[in-house]
Amino acid sequence: MAKEITPRSEDYSQWYLDIVQKARLADNSPVRGCMVIKPHGFGLWEKMRDQLDFMFKETGHVNAYFPLFIPKSFLSKEAAHVEGFAKECAVVTHYRLKNDPNGGGVVVDPEAKLEEELIVRPTSETIIWDTYRNWIQSYRDLPLLINQWANVVRWEMRTRPFLRTAEFLWQEGHTAHASAEEAVEETLKILDVYATFAEEWMAMPVIKGIKTPNERFAGADETYCIEALMQDGKALQAGTSHFLGQNFAKAFDVQFLNKENQQEYVWATSWGVSTRLIGGLIMTHSDDDGLVLPPRLAPIQVVIVPIPKPSDELTVVANKIAADLKAKGIRVKIDNDDQNRPGFKFAEYEMIGIPVRLGLGQRDIAAGQIEVARRDTKEKNSAALDTIADYVENLLEEIQQNLFNRAKAYRDEHITRVDTWDEFVQTLEEKGGFISAHWDGTTETEEEVKTLTKATIRCIPVDAPEEDGKCVRTGKPSKRRVLFAKSY
Amino acid sequence: MAKEITPRSEDYSQWYLDIVQKARLADNSPVRGCMVIKPHGFGLWEKMRDQLDFMFKETGHVNAYFPLFIPKSFLSKEAAHVEGFAKECAVVTHYRLKNDPNGGGVVVDPEAKLEEELIVRPTSETIIWDTYRNWIQSYRDLPLLINQWANVVRWEMRTRPFLRTAEFLWQEGHTAHASAEEAVEETLKILDVYATFAEEWMAMPVIKGIKTPNERFAGADETYCIEALMQDGKALQAGTSHFLGQNFAKAFDVQFLNKENQQEYVWATSWGVSTRLIGGLIMTHSDDDGLVLPPRLAPIQVVIVPIPKPSDELTVVANKIAADLKAKGIRVKIDNDDQNRPGFKFAEYEMIGIPVRLGLGQRDIAAGQIEVARRDTKEKNSAALDTIADYVENLLEEIQQNLFNRAKAYRDEHITRVDTWDEFVQTLEEKGGFISAHWDGTTETEEEVKTLTKATIRCIPVDAPEEDGKCVRTGKPSKRRVLFAKSY
């Protein structure tokens, strides 16, 4: 089975599609650009969602749910927002079908035309701020710390499963505050939540940074992001947290009576991560044999395979091990299939990315041993049967850490400091990754670099030190380095 | 605040809307028929969803996610289905907006018309069975036990929050089986899951039954349901589980190689419950002072109110009690607000339905006591401070049980056996509730009764004994009683 995957060295893009398909994460659908998330892929998303949801609640947020549809006129209310989001979107114009008078199915009923078209939400700032107007009167109603788990639709022309789909699942936080300082603090707090989640749960190292004005969210005063590096040297924007200033409050007239008894526009943030993270997870850890999952997010962490096939005796031992592992909160599956041979099963479990595989053979058991295979390094070991639960528990932690270290080593090796344009072009072509270079701060230069090389400024790292330098493209003075890369 | 609620005796329908508003469950939205589910309402839905999800997984189901959009032609493929669902729905006809050439916002770009219109899913049988065609080849791929948590849209003309909204949240299970027997077994298994959830978690007694052909799901061979009774004597269909036969398999050509090595169409079920359950919960337990929630589903189960207001000393005691309650898995909030008076707070917590309120006063503490108020009966007691956690734990169970018993007593009193038409009409008008009566088994009679009285056959109870009788309307022979009622 593993042979069916295109090697990364041959065609990274096809390798990615193969993994999505063969690891049973997602399937194409008959609707252009929309995918079906299969049970294994959705199980992974559930684990990610549950942990993020826990972290949002720990930081004081609550969930709510706002309508799928946005009246068309709402999109025009915030000047920058409409430019960014009112273009490629799904538009509902009618609310009824009727039987085709000429036979053959149903047709849109021309009588059932909406007075105002509805847009399937591409993001929900507009409808949420229209609602907040009724919820906020005084500073005592603030802050409002609300998150929503939802589906959104953006009519992308070129789609790829998880990375860019017309419909995707995400969470969008929308908070309201009494001061700019508090809103900025919230924006940064969430950036930290995202970075912690990416690094400690996804084992995916990220750089926290600020987007250039050109790459800002449409309607934001400042966009913060976490940027990760994929195995092919391209960057992936993995999450964004926006300080929206008073832009949406002004567009939707949301004012509050402040402590000084004066009317003031409310300060806002919004932030989101999506099923795109699954694409990032795949491209951070997986290999030519299939998916590799960090143990903390793996829907199944351990599989026990009786060798050569299930028997009453092996089942007793397998059940005992499974019970011990479950008692430690470890997610375990026993393979009771007696049709396929171990070799086939091993390849299958490697393909779908189960972190640890226990091979349970009669002779091993007699010797008080069990075979342990780890997915990340493909190493096999024998471990003592009577302490196997402790061994596996430690091993899962070790794998989690190893995946992070491996990804971080790769990422760090692929941040190259560059001071000349020739070096810039050469590094981008030959090595890829992030290029740390000076930039003169203008959108013109940013656009020019993009036109010449396809690289964009991924972010200005939040911890970038001040440093006098010259723009790598124009030679004009610069105060700090930014990170360029080609990106997804 | 409680005074703002219209009493049930005066106007039940307005009372319901008042509860939804004042208990902060939902809000109207600018989109016709769509509601905003507020944090308190969504917290309740999360508890319901999590428990149902747990029960689905315990019975072997996994989650997946299918597209929001359904190609128009799919709806026509199953003859009965199209009649039921292809009428009032949201139709996407375009995929782009553009700046209005005459200024003033955005307009639909006529160039961006879809070749085939997309329907926002009213239910997902069609797109899921189109997908299953690729997933099922042999009996070894079966059963497929998949559930989806999703939003759906049905363009209802008359809407009421939770009970009937254009967009609502639900789960829809879609399973595929190798035999009719196994599919029927699945249908009944889920019916039991729904009934258990309704009774043990929502404390809402339900009757399990079979729908008449007239009330069947469009495309089902048999529809099972759970029916509950609201306080105003009207029934509420709380969940349905459908045996779909081979209808969708035939419509989407989903065949499998059976054990006898022959091609056979796959057998199907589908089943769902929605945010409508929140409407049922409200109308089963709540009163003129606000929402009443069963403890197992209450987002906050216990609130501790320092009296007359928070102080360092009271906070120490409150924290200790809260820690003890949390250690027992009880969801507790400490009210640290020092602006409002206890009377105001008490009314507020009654309004939003917190099951148990602890009033913590200096004098009580000195006497080793604490005041305990329960929401269901409005009774107040003193309890010993040193064993308060145990006391509250037991009390929450008692409230859960009391709510169920109370609702069941009301429901049982409102099932009336009736044998004449006059009695039928009189009972319906004066008493309401379920009427257990004989019916001749024809759709004509069912429709006639509905036209004359607005009552419909809610179900044929699964445990209805065979009993010779005469139809309450036509006098024709009947083999068993069915349940009639007016309904939501």
Image (cartoon, coloured by chain):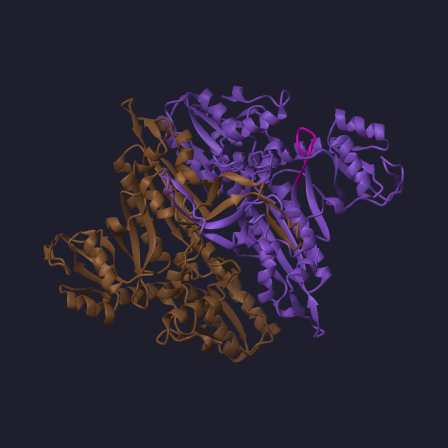
Chain colours: A brown, B purple
Q: Is residue B235 magenta?
A: yes
**Between B143 and A392, the one nearer to me in the picture:** B143
Q: Residue at x 85, y 35 (%)?
A: B472
Query: Residue furthest toward the bottom?
Result: A363
Residue A270, position as x, y percentages in the image: 35, 43
Q: Quadrant of the C terminus of chain A?
A: bottom left
Q: Residue at x 53, y 34 (%)?
A: B391
Is residue A25 placed above or below A93 in the rendered structure? Answer: below
Q: Residue at x 35, y 75 (%)?
A: A9
Q: Is residue A8 left or right of residue B189?
A: left
Is residue B296 placed above or below B315 in the rendered structure? Answer: below
- Which quadrant of the structure image shows residue A94? top right
**Between A400 and B461, the one nearer to me in the picture:** B461
Q: Is residue B379 left or right of residue A214?
A: right
**Between B22 and A57, the one nearer to me in the picture:** B22
Q: Is residue B312 visible?
A: no
Residue A30, position as x, y percentages in the image: 53, 60
Is residue A2 placed above or below A437 in the rendered structure? Answer: below
Q: Residue at x 57, y 36 (%)?
A: B294
Residue A261, position as x, y percentages in the image: 29, 22
Q: Is residue A359 magenta?
A: no
Q: Is residue B410 left or right of residue A36?
A: right
Q: Which residues are magenta?
A: B229-237
Q: How many marks?
A: 0
Residue B380, position as x, y percentages in the image: 54, 24
Q: Is residue B473 left or right of residue B142?
A: right
Q: Is residue B110 visible?
A: yes
